[in-house]
């Protein structure tokens, strides 16, 4: 069960990574590299030391979300999946109302198998336009859901982490 403490951890970690956004790389041509595999194995503490000393990390969008969940003790698999496999995984119940999204919920843009994945950073239970943390290019973005959605192919589904 994703606890309030784990969700707060996700928010704090995303905040820290945003501070180092210039050191976050995206795989060239959206093809995972050896750097991705190396960075997936880093603990949160190792990653923070690396970044504090000027190092760089590389993830694609779904690896980034999986790594955040792994650091919070919520990732249910040994390896990162990809947007389509996460979308198909039975451990992530689907819903479509962003007003229900809490910190850590995964957001998949585009029809299956999905085109891009982000994570809810700050919920918006009234307006349904939460702030999301998105790593779909070098760097890291904190943007409202509707801004991200406008730049993606049609289709939006949220994946619950509540039961992880």
Image (cartoon, rainbow, N blue to C red):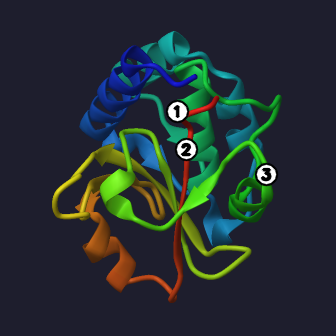
Mark 1 residue crowding within 10 angstroms, few (<14) / some (14–19) / many (20+): many
- Say left or right for 59 vs 15: right
Q: Position of residue 68 (x, y in %)?
A: 52, 33
Dividing the picture into quadrants, the one containing residue 146 is bottom left
Q: Is residue 160 left or right of residue 41?
A: left
4 and 50: which one is in front?
4
Residues at marks 1 and 3, CA–CA distance in whole angstroms: 18 Å
Q: Does residue 157 appear left or right of residue 129 in this picture?
A: right
Q: Are marks 1 and 3 in contact (CB under 8 Å)?
A: no
- Residues 35 and 150: in front is 150
In the picture, the quarter occupied by the C terminus is top right
Question: Which badge, 2 or 3, comes first in the chain's sequence?
Answer: 2
Residue that appears at 64% across and 46% down: 63
Identify the mark at residue 65; answer none if there is no mark: 2
Q: Which mark is nearer the camera, 2 or 3?
A: 3
Q: Which of the 4 image quadrants contains residue 21?
A: top left
Per the image, label 1 sits on a secondary structure element best described as helix
For the residue labelled by badge 3, is the local secondary structure a helix, a strand or a loop?
loop
Is disc 1 in contact with disc 2, using a CB cutoff of under 8 Å?
A: yes
Distance from label 1 to label 2 (Cα)?
Answer: 5 Å
Q: Residue most toward the bottom?
A: 154
Residue 81 on image: x %, y %: 77, 49
């Amino acid at each position: 069960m994703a606890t309030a403490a784990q969700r707060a951890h996700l928010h704090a970690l995303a905040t820290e990574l945003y501070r180092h956004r210039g050191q976050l790389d995206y795989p060239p041509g959206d093809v995972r590299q050896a750097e991705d595999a190396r960075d997936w194995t880093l603990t949160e503490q190792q990653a923070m030391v690396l970044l504090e000393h000027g190092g760089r990390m590389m993830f694609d969008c779904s690896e980034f979300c999986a790594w955040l969940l792994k650091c919070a003790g919520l990732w249910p698999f040994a390896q990162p999946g990809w947007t389509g496999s996460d979308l198909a995984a039975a451990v992530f119940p689907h819903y479509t109302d962003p007003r229900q999204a809490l910190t850590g919920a995964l957001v998949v843009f585009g029809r299956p198998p999905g085109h891009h994945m982000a994570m809810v950073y700050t919920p918006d239970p009234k307006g349904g336009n939460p702030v999301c943390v998105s790593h779909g290019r070098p760097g890291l973005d904190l943007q409202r859901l509707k801004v991200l959605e406008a730049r993606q192919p049609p289709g939006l589904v949220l994946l619950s982490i509540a039961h992880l």
